[in-house]
Amino acid sequence: MSAGFMSGKVFKLSVFFCLLTGCVCNAIQDSNAPWQTDDKLAALAKLFETGKTRQITVDADGHADFNSIQKAVDSVGKGNKERVVVLIKPGFYRERVLIPENKPFITLRGEDPFKTTISYNLNHEMLKPDGSGKYRSDCATLIAESPDLILENLTVENTFGPHPQALAAKLVCERAIAVNCRFLGGQDTLMANSGRQYYLNCYVEGGTDFIYGYAQAVFDNCTIHSKENSHITAHAASEPNLPTGFVFYNCRVTTADGIMTDLGRPWRPYAKVVYYDCWLDKGIKPVGWDNWRDPNREKTAFFAEYRSSGPGANPSSRVKWSHQLNDEEAKKFLPGNFMKLDGITVDQWLREILDFRKTTAIKN
């Protein structure tokens, strides 16, 4: 019997075993299990801290260095060369947070994503107050353009509504990490737009194209929740053979009651999305994928699955131009292979992640 059909008793025993052994429980075991944080995974972020790491505290009530996250970010010097941890006390922070390209090595760290929320409500079509035009993707609640960003134990949300596009987060970052974070929105919740990005045990919720962009991103042991009859992903690549794409590794893909959605569509012709060992809910359409009303993209996009399980796994009904990977083909989409710098090199950043995955017994 597959993990997706375990009885409640067996599932409880498996969770108990996972807690005893210190491993990250397989995300595909129970479709009804709510997303939870995993405190031991927060240790990943600390691997990138040194004796020179500086800490800044933020408290909305004023009992800290700053009363807003943006003020704390503003205090970091341009061209910063050491890790700065912005420790955010529990609270509701109604503000936009903008981290420019010239402020690398910033960590935004909450204590609990259910108690620490960054929230705003702009949308794609709203006009900027300076008269320069519409916000477009800059409507995001959090915009980060700096390398070596880390997000931990936070909720980032855009509360505008299901439509039009209203981003929670826009990450234009090389070597970005998010751990134990929630990204909540409607259309275009999370724009993973460039660089290598690694999401570990995160929760992403939205409606249309709610994970999209040009990045080279791995979603590891995450929960992806669709609440609209639409499309989950919209990856983009305008040229063939680029080391980009989205890989959902050992994730749980859930759908709201009555919803039927697909796994993704190609925003640009050479989009690449792979669901690797994921549990798929009953609201995943049997055809699996959409061509964005362009048959030509069926020839160029790479959409694939490997060992999907759950009621939404339906390989025989998938569109013919998608792929069901064999064991050998799937190896290139393991996190350690897919996240290589330029598709070739295991750099120190990736090595830290891979070593951490081994020591914490994250399923590989």
Image (spheres, helix red, strand yellow):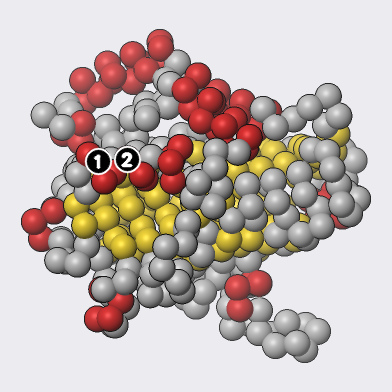
Question: Which residue is painted at 54% across and 26% down in the image?
Answer: 356
Question: Which residue is painted at 57% across and 32% down in the image?
Answer: 351
Residue at the spot of label 2: 331
State the image quarter where residue 122 is shown: bottom right
Q: How crowded is mark 2: few (under 14 residues within 10 Å), some or many (20 or more)?
A: some
Q: In the image, what residue type sits under mark 2?
A: Lys
Relative horizontal placement of residue 161, taking residue 48 as reference (left or right): left
The spot of residue 151 in percent (x, y) is 64, 43
Q: How crowded is mark 1: few (under 14 residues within 10 Å), some or many (20 or more)?
A: few
The spot of residue 92 in percent (x, y) is 68, 49
How far apart marks 1 and 2 lie (CA) works out to: 6 Å
The spot of residue 328 in percent (x, y) is 24, 41
Q: In the image, what residue type sits under mark 1?
A: Glu
- Residue 304 vs 199, above or below: the answer is below
Question: Relative to the observer, which residue lies in front, 343 or 158?
Answer: 343
Relative horizontal placement of residue 158, taking residue 54 as reference (left or right): left
* SS of the residue under disc 1: helix
Relative horizontal placement of residue 192, taking residue 49 as reference (left or right): left
Q: Can you tell which mark lies on residue 23? A: none
* SS of the residue under disc 2: helix
Labels 1 & 2 near each other (Cβ < 8 A): yes
Note whether residue 155 is visible: no
Residue at the spot of label 1: 328
Question: Which residue is painted at 43% across and 21% down in the image?
Answer: 361
